[in-house]
Image (cartoon, rainbow, N blue to C red):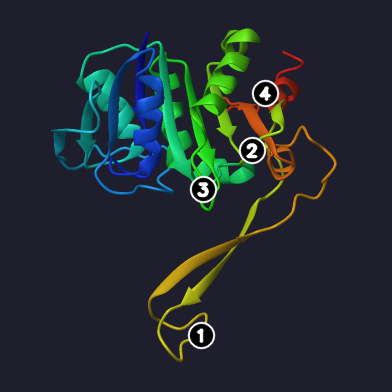
Amino acid sequence: MKILIVNDDGIDAPGILHLAKWAKRFADVTVCAPRVEQSGRSHAINFIEPFEIKHVELCEGVDAYSVDSTPADCTRFGIIGLGRSYDLVLSGINYGVNMSGDIVYSGTVGAIFEAESRGHRAAALSIAKEDPLPEFSVLDSIFEFINKNRLFDASNLYNVNIPPSPKGIKITRQGDAYFSDEFFPIEAGKKNGDDGIYIQRGHAVPDTVPEDLTRDTVAFANGYISVTPMTSCRTDARAFQALTNDE
């Protein structure tokens, strides 16, 4: 089995090393990760300027590269640049959950969208920033669940969020908003609307239907691993059907 591993936290992030060590037990592993953190870069690529790619030492038995660009470009280099195909592309393990509408901003998820566009099956893996990395046994259970239930027969893309000491696994869909953001001027005496330097900060907000375990946010908050099938197609299928119904 051949696996490409990418992330948005960077080549030095503990999560990608952990995932590579787990995967190399049963697969031929290639790692392509950003030189520095690229969180929030979504599916961006850089075709304007040249960027550096370096072969690096990550761990024994893993072919690893530092890519001075976005997560999607890491996927592109791993597939196009190296001229390789893979049985599976994994993105993560990301520090910071990727759920609900925030998925659209995620470089972790953007990297698997790129994999799917290149004809590869892929999954993104995330944990909360304050949580420990999952034990290998937890990762084993996730992929046993995926294989046993033949999930990749239904979709090429899955977004997985892993709580600590999970109770089990739930197939989920995107929930309601998980973060609420605000702009803050960082210079003393400045108020919103003044010229100056700003930073965005967010805080978690509860889902509006807390009993619905089919929502990724709710399943995760209740201690379940959420496994959400994804699609990179941006066509609104319901609108298309309604608008072409008479044709």
Residue 171 appears anywhere in the view:
no
232 or 30: nearer the viewer:
30
Q: For mark 3, what is the residue? A: 96
Q: Hey, what amino acid is under mark 3? A: Gly
**Residue at 49% in and 45% down:** 105
- The Cα atoms of the two marked residues, 2 and 3, are separated by 17 Å
Query: For numbered disc 4, what is the local secondary structure?
Result: helix
Q: For mark 2, what is the residue? A: 165
Badge 3: few (under 14), some or many (20 or more) residues near its Cα, within 10 Å?
Answer: some
Residue 70 appears anywhere in the view:
yes
Q: For mark 4, what is the residue? A: 237
Locate residue 197, reporting x and y percent.
38, 76
Which of the 4 image quarters holds residue 240? top right
Front of the two marks 4 and 2: 2
Q: Earlier in the sequence, mark 1 or mark 4?
A: 1
Quadrant in the picture for the N terminus: top left
- The Cα atoms of the two marked residues, 2 and 1, are separated by 43 Å
